[in-house]
Image: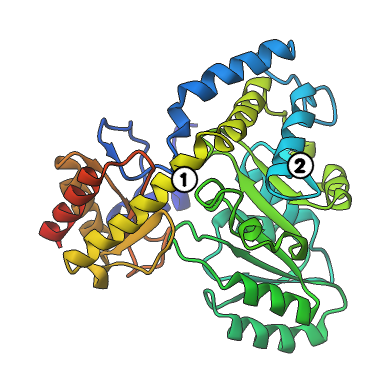
Amino acid sequence: MSKLPLKINKSLEKRKSNGSFRELKPSKNLVDFSSNDYLGFGNNENIHRRSRQILKQNSALLNGAGGSRLLTGNHILYASAEELVAYFHKAESALIFNSGYDANLGIFSSVPGKGDLILYDELIHASIRDGIKLSAAKATKFAHNDLEDLGKKISRLKKGILGEVYLVTESIFSMDGDSPDLHALVALAEEKECFLIIDEAHAVGVNGAGLIAEADLQEKVFARLVTFGKALGAHGAAILGSKELKNYLVNFARSLIYSTALPPHSLSIIIAAYEELQGVGISKIENLQENIEYFKAEVSKRGLQKHFLESESAIHCCILPGNELVRAASGKIAEKGFDVRPILSPTVPEGSERLRICLHSFNSKAEIAELTEVLKNIL
């Protein structure tokens, strides 16, 4: 049949009418202020060359894994990669999934169960929300980064819970660029005897091993998610935690059990990227942190602070309410040679549409200054 069901057509027409229709478009040759490739590892030649060496040294020149990890796909590079990832992030163990989405589906659909309670930040990533939907646990959101609200909800809701309570948040939020008070959050989790799960996708690389390891809080967090497709310029993700947690996920995380494993090439890139991160990557992190401070100074110099959300990360969001308005602004910025993407509702709540500016180690001071001047003229 060539026709779509009526309700599907209506959904598409609604998206088109309110300006939120999504399309796949080729990337343009613009100055990158949009990608999550914070350190430029995505086209790093050293990582590419080193990955080839790793494949040859391990006789792993294969196009694919050939099966799931529990069948034939658990090739030799998995053990090396997981050992390296666990060591770098100061974790007891690491379990690699095909993507951050798969990792979040895996842990949240299998760990919190019937009789448990999940309390999650209202701005948590869609992959976590989808994982929670697959869980048999009860779930309730708390106000964004509001630990007072979280504390009240734990006290009120825990009374009727026979099982465990899981607290879920991100160390750096992907659409706001802000962070919770991690020390206070850990203290609250300890006080209330809750299990803490933190998504560190946008902190890895930007802050070295992530904000949890940076604050030396890794022993007090039940599980962390780290991804390789952002600052590491690779693909895949890992759940960090105890060896017992890893064993449990291998047995019960369906997104791991029933997926064809990553090919050796993907694992060799991950290993090479971590090696690079511990070498010249240190200077790239320093460059990125300098660019973050410079961008904030340029925004302040032009009096644009009122348009921006507070952020100490590589993600900076300029609020321009309305899908059409923010899309038009992105187009004008592109005409000046810069790639800054609009974030439309329903990805973010209606009325909080925004330009999402991602800073990188490779952006020059001149590019940053020119971008902020373009923004000033548009605003």
As helix, strand or loop, the secondary structure at mark 1 comes to helix
Q: Closer to the camera: disc 2 or disc 1?
A: 1
Q: Give the residue drawn at x 44%, y 47%.
A: 286
Q: What is the number of the mark on residue 285?
A: 1
Mark 2 or mark 1: whose residue is earlier in sequence = 2
Residue nearer the viewer, 68 or 376: 376
Give the distance between the C-alpha atoms of the residues marked 2 and 1, in whole angstroms. 25 Å
Tell me which amino acid carries mark 1: Ile
Give the structural element (helix, strand or loop) at label 2.
strand
Question: Given contact means CB atoms under 8 Å apart, are the residues at marks 2 and 1 in contact?
Answer: no
Q: Is residue 294 above or below residue 84?
A: below
- Residue 339 position by quadrant: top left
State the image coordinates of residue 358 (x, y, percent, origin top left): 37, 49
What residue is drawn where x is 79% and y is 30%?
Answer: 79
Percent position (x, y) of residue 272?
A: 60, 27
Q: Amino acid at mark 2?
A: Leu
Tell me if mark 1 has few (under 14), some (14-19) or many (20+) residues whose alpha carbon lies within 10 angstroms of its own. many
Depicted 220 relative to depicted 203: above or below = below
Q: How many marks?
A: 2
Query: What residue is shown with label 2?
Result: 95
Which of 293 and 308 lies nearest the eye of the viewer?
Answer: 293
Q: Quadrant of residue 200?
A: bottom right
